[in-house]
């Protein structure tokens, strides 16, 4: 009861305080919780409003970690953060590891420099940790405030998660940086950007840089052509210092999210499996060195680290054989093989021709759509025509910063020809595999 009251009070506060375009968002009722903070005028504190939404896997007793999904710069990307915690595919990763899924939405005005939030030293670090503490109280999971993080970020969000990794390496289990990275040296073209120095000790946090090929890898011109050169300036010194860092180039995209989640989620899964404490509250474990694979920078083949003939200090790092094999497919065409069907839908209900159900996403390939059967005959798909202009069609759709579309897709079908009968619902993942 206490959790519900807290969540509803927080929701009411947000609804009365937020201004367009941040005033439309999914409700946050358990297992979702949300807190929001107004902008601060105090130097060093966050100078724009922010809200944090967290999803807690139903039935989990003690959280072992927090998967953080961080949007990028710009008003559109910041607005997209409002649905990040509702993503079924990212929830599958969190659920597997008894982790929460948290997404922020920094309410960035269109004409404001995003460095005011994507540099955590300007107040967003403290606001984030305050949000975790308040959400721990709201959800009844005090461990949420101290659990380790798996960080994913896009563009300016990639800079944020990279900086948070360098600021809090003992708290960070793994970090995926899509189309961005911290600056280790001053950038004359970015006078508002403050560089950061690498720690003196080698960074044990596994990291992945994930540019699109049109961001300066194979296409050297265009708005985002400087992204990869900037990421490379982060990769080389981190790797030379012994950092566990790799590069996964999407061969189809520019700055959009594309199909990277089909590599990011399995990679984070592998890192969390090896790094999360054996018991909640314990220290993060080290990645097993004997399982690593290496690949030449911007190459498309990988071998066990013991068989690598080049300079390991310049090679891309991959955690194990399974991830290396998936990575080989990803950097060639993003078509990572999947041989396991998605979980079957549950709790199918029919009321006057209205069919509803529950479903969990497939960890490897998410959910593309559902097939509705009546008396053994396929009568419809939900959605009717799955689309996604940024990558594989998804049941929830996909925004530029890798979050579901609003309004959120419903697991619901209205049978206008209903005359009674027996209904079944089948889940289909983005690899085309069908559930029971």
Image: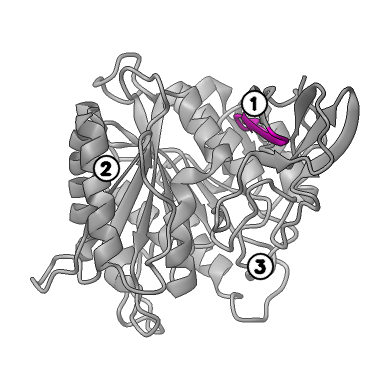
Relative vertical location of residue 114 with respect to residue 278 in this rendering, above or below: below
Q: Residue at x 38, y 32 (%)?
A: 56
Q: Earlier in the sequence, mark 3 or mark 1?
A: 3
* Sequence order check, earlier mark of 2 and 1: 2
Judged from the image, the secondary structure of the residue bearing numbered disc 1 is: strand
User: Who's the residue at 53% across and 39% down the image?
Assistant: 90
Residue 172: x %, y % from top left: 34, 38
The figure's colour scheme reads one colour
Front residue (pair 279, 28) = 28
Report the disc number at residue 349: 1
User: What number is the disc on residue 7?
Assistant: 2
Magenta span has 355?
A: yes
- Rounded to the nearest angstrom, the CA distance separating label 2 from label 1 is 28 Å
Pointers 2 and 1 in contact (C-beta within 8 Å): no
* Pick the front one: 305 or 251: 251
Is residue 90 visible to the viewer in this orientation of the structure?
Answer: yes
Tag shown at residue 254? 3
Q: CA distance from mark 3 to mark 2?
A: 38 Å
Which of the 4 quarters of the picture holds residue 109? bottom left
Q: Is residue 72 above or below residue 333?
A: below
Mark closer to the chain start, 3 or 2: 2
């Amino acid at each position: 009861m206490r959790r519900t009251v807290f969540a509803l009070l927080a929701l009411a506060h947000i609804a009365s305080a937020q201004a367009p375009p941040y005033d439309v968002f999914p409700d946050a009722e358990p297992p979702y919780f949300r807190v929001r903070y107004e902008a601060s005028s105090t130097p060093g504190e966050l100078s724009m409003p922010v809200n944090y939404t967290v999803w807690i896997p139903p039935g989990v007793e003690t959280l072992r970690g927090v998967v953080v999904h961080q949007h990028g710069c710009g008003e559109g990307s910041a607005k997209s953060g409002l649905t990040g915690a509702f993503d079924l595919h990212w929830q599958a990763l969190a659920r597997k590891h008894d982790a929460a899924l948290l997404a922020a939405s920094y309410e960035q005005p269109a004409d404001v420099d995003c460095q005011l939030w994507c540099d955590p030293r300007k107040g967003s670090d403290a606001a984030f940790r305050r949000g975790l503490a308040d959400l721990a109280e709201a959800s009844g999971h005090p461990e949420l405030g101290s659990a380790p993080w798996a960080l994913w970020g896009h563009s300016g969000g990639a800079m944020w998660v990279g900086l948070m990794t360098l600021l809090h390496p003992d708290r960070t289990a793994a970090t995926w940086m899509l189309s961005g990275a911290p600056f280790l040296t001053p950038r004359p073209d970015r006078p508002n950007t403050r560089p950061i120095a690498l720690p003196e000790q080698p960074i044990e946090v596994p990291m992945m840089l994930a540019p699109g090929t049109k961001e300066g890898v194979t296409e050297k011109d265009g708005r985002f052509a400087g992204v990869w050169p900037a990421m490379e300036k982060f990769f080389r010194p981190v790797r030379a210092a012994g950092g566990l860092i790799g590069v996964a180039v999407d061969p189809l995209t520019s700055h959009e999210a594309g199909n990277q989640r089909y590599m990011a989620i399995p990679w984070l899964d592998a890192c969390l499996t090896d790094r999360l404490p054996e018991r909640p509250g314990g220290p993060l474990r080290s990645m097993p060195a004997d399982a690593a694979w290496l690949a030449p920078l911007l190459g498309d083949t990988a071998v066990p680290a013991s068989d690598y003939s080049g300079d390991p200090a310049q090679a891309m790092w991959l955690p194990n054989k399974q991830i290396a094999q998936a990575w080989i497919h990803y950097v060639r065409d993003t078509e990572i093989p999947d041989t396991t069907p998605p979980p079957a839908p549950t709790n199918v209900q029919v009321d006057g021709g209205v069919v509803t159900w529950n479903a969990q996403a497939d960890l490897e390939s998410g959910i593309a759509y559902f097939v509705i059967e009546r008396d053994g005959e396929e009568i419809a798909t939900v959605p009717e025509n799955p689309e996604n202009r940024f990558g594989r069609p998804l049941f929830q759709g996909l925004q530029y910063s890798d979050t579901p579309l609003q309004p959120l897709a419903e697991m619901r079908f209205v049978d206008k020809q209903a005359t009674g009968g027996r209904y079944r619902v089948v889940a289909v993942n983005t690899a085309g595999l069908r559930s029971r």
